[in-house]
Amino acid sequence: PKTVYLKNYQAPDYLIDETHLSFELHEDRTLVEARLAMRRNPAGGAGLPPLVLDGQQLELLAVTLDGRELGVHEYQVDDSHLSLQPERAEFVVETRVCIHPESNTALEGLYKSGKMFCTQCEAEGFRKITYYLDRPDVMSRFTTTLSAEQQRYPVLLSNGNPVASGNTDNGRHWATWEDPFRKPAYLFALVAGDLWCVEDEFTTLSGRRVTLRIYVEPENIDKCQHAMDSLKRAMRWDEETYGREYDLDIFMIVAVNDFNMGAMENKGLNIFNSGAVLAKAETATDAAHQRVEAIVAHEYFHNWSGNRVTCRDWFQLSLKEGFTVFRDAGFSADMNSATVKRIEDVAYLRTHQFAEDAGPMAHSVRPDSYMEISNFYTLTVYEKGSEVVGMLRTLLGAEGFRRGSDLYFERHDGQAVTCDDFVKAMEDANGVDLTQFKRWYTQAGTPCLEVAEQYDAKAGTYTLTFRQSCPPTPSQAHKEPFVIPVALALLDGQGRELPLRLTGEAEAAGSGRVLAVTAAEQAFTFVDLPERPLPSLLRNFSAPVKLVYPYGRDQLMFLMQHDSDGFNRWEAGQQLAVQVLQELVGQQQRGESMVLDRRLLAALKSVLENEGLDPAMVAEMLSLPGEAYLIEISAVADVEAIHAAREFARREIAGALYEPLWQRYRSNREVSRQSPYVASAEHFARRALQNIALSYLMLSGRPEVLAACQDQYQATDNMTERLAALAVLVNSPFEAEKAKALAMFADYFQDDPLVMDQWFSVQAGCSLPGGLERVQALMKHPAFTLKNPNKVRALIGAFANQNHVNFHRADGLGYRFLADQVIMLNALNPQIAARQLAPLTRWRKYDAVRQVLMRAELERILACGELSCDVYEVVSKSLA
Ligand code: B3K
Ligand code: ZN
């Protein structure tokens, strides 16, 4: 495989003004005709270079230039290109190809999901549909005609507006769609199937009426309302928050069962993984409802941040993804609890993105090179990219940021641009210089920010000294200092925020502020402080860094109670728990008996008894840091000791806080029993607390808890309660009850694939001994198939990413199992294969014996023959 470099970017030689496509869809083959009205790119050099069109897995039937069919000696074809020599600066190329969607298991290009035809083109899938300039800086107006058998495919969809349709003889029909907006090929989509739809309407701020439709297979028609409501809220929010209006007469979402990612923002025709759109109380959990709301919004927001303004090249992916994640996070924060949303996002970032940043695939938010772009749809590009946009907002303020985004959209509407253009708009709208800030786009790795304090009682001054560093990452040994916005406050002995005045300032400017740390080492001195303050640092996680400050446990307990920043109250609790758990890990490793610091119990008790606190916050604060996070922050991760320590702490908490947990459980369960399910933040919060309480209580093994759990499993109208009860049963020692519940569940929900995914996941994540054997048995279950990415993620992914003790079992059989699956997936679906590999690439985190075992599996994959570019890149880089 070849490496592509950002530094080699060149503007396209030719442009495509008009694209006319025609698809003849058949069960055993599909014919695609393309008519491309092209011209020499005026931004290119002189002369007429050869035209090189991208194309893969296409059977070329004919090619014409300006209406004349070319002979075989007038063009060249190989397995990835079609080249020919234009004779004029403006010309029309027509091609006719045959493709095979029915045998496309990679789910890229045109493929069949169940009984329907659908497409996935981002990043480079369009070239598997027809010969084209498949790059995002070639933007064209598309007209698409598709024809298919009327009976099996009554619905025919593509981008834009429907303009004509009709029947032909032989039981077929056709439809033509026209998209008035120029777009790159990656935003092309078509769908043909026997689909039903839910329809609604939205009136934009300027009074235009837009038809909204969600298309699904008939059996799912009752699971669309939540997505429809979310869509309308997202449309309104984007008008109010970013001034962005929708621009076509119709907006469509289609749910498909076989999809590599969550969803895709094709212009006017978003295609969704059914798991990211379908939701109703009986079958989808609260978390699934929130995920649907977030993804519907994310894809909708792409209409501006991605489609109207797109990326010049794929190195700029974070231009649309980081920004759009930032936008959807703002939306979710406004629809639910902002603090809880921030906590969830930060926990996710620190667990998974920090691990990526510390691993062999580490790359900057704007990577410099790739072998396979599909491998760069990463936590770094998405989640860290969103943090980078968030830092801009923190530094510029809400209004300055909005000025910048307005300028960006206005200046670049209809263009394919770069991350530099985005930052430039922020600079120009605010009259600031962000040159140093842009290092966040080019330097990989998670910076470490060490903070030391010094208090001078006589002078009443308090100095914070910040020292930043960033570990080396592949091909980046040395890093220059970042601009790190540190939001902070100084608290007095009662927890009140003190007025902040830095030396040299005339007067105090409020009590909370943002310091910009720009040097490798930098000190800030605050004056007028009669007592030594306690700092509340990096509030709301104002930068994606590892903060190191030597808080004592009593100080953390104080911050948990008093910090006026909700995020930092949670953070203090997490840090306290981390300290306590790491102490237990040490005891376990030394063979000592474990003793839990009672201060953690006292802290959690007061959280539990605080009736004034948002129940969602109580639930978050009761959740101990996950095993994956504890692994991430270990120098050498001892998976067994971490698991044992965390389980020990959970049992101690359950024992010591049994009464308040039971009380909290019962009062919330009572509400659940008496009122029908409502998908709202208030009820998500209540059920989160109810369910975490139940998970602790079950550790007691008491019969009244088992009875309550079984009751919750059976007597409920929603999946949130049912699945939580099933999960705690599955992780309990009550073998008979567990087996019965699992069997009942599978029997009842066997025909609902998304519910069966949850059934697989709950079992795959069970950390009791024998996990691998259970997963291997489940692979043979009739509802399981390697061909469906959701099933792969639900079973194999959940096992390798969430079931640490079983995946990392000492004999290496967990690793062998994963490698076997990757080898099989490599042949079926390279994108999914490469993604499932991630846990093996982290081999440097573990002890010497496990390192050898993990590496051996990576070597075995490398040696197994025909590797896809996707898998080759990940394996070879992780062994380098
Ligand atoms: N833009 C799509 C990503 C599709 C990538 C496929 N390899 C989803 C999203 O971020 O909205
Ligand atoms: Zn996106």
Image (cartoon, helix red, strand yellow):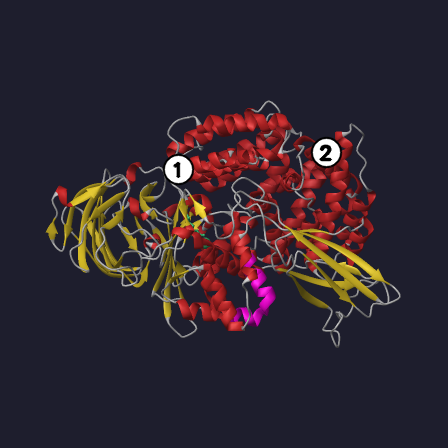
Provide the secondary structure element on which disc 1 rests.
helix
Q: Residues within 10 Å of mark 2 (few under 14, many from 20)?
A: few
Which residue matches tag 1?
Answer: 869
The numbered disc on residue 614 is none
Indicate left or right for 861 with 56 as reference. Answer: right
Q: Horizontal and vertical percent for residue 323?
A: 49, 59
- Please say whether residue 402 is one of the residues in the magenta stretch: yes
- Please say whether residue 468 is one of the residues in the magenta stretch: no
The answer to whether any part of residue 261 appears in the image is no
Whether the residue carrying mark 1 lies under 8 Å from ligand 1 is answered with no
The answer to whether any part of residue 670 appears in the image is yes
In this view, 823 is above or below 333: above
- Give the magenta range: 388-403
In this view, 774 is above or below 459: above
In this view, 789 is above or below 499: above
**Residue 81 lies in what quarter of the image?**
top left
Q: CA distance from mark 1 to mark 2?
A: 50 Å
The mark tally for this picture is 2
Amino acid type of the residue that numbered disc 2 sits on in the rendered structure: Gly
- Residue found at the far right of this picture: 458
Q: Horizontal and vertical percent for residue 591?
A: 78, 27
In this view, 630 is above or below 551: above
| Screen quadrant of the N terminus | top left
The numbered disc on residue 701 is 2
Q: Residues within 10 Å of mark 1 (few under 14, many from 20)?
A: some
**Residue 392 lies in what quarter of the image?**
bottom right
Provide the secondary structure element on which disc 2 rests.
loop
The nearer-to-camera label among 1 and 2 is 1
Whether the residue carrying mark 2 lies under 8 Å from ligand 1 is answered with no
In the image, 877 versus 652, the foreground residue is 877
Amino acid type of the residue that numbered disc 1 sits on in the rendered structure: Cys
Q: Horizontal and vertical percent for residue 312?
A: 39, 57
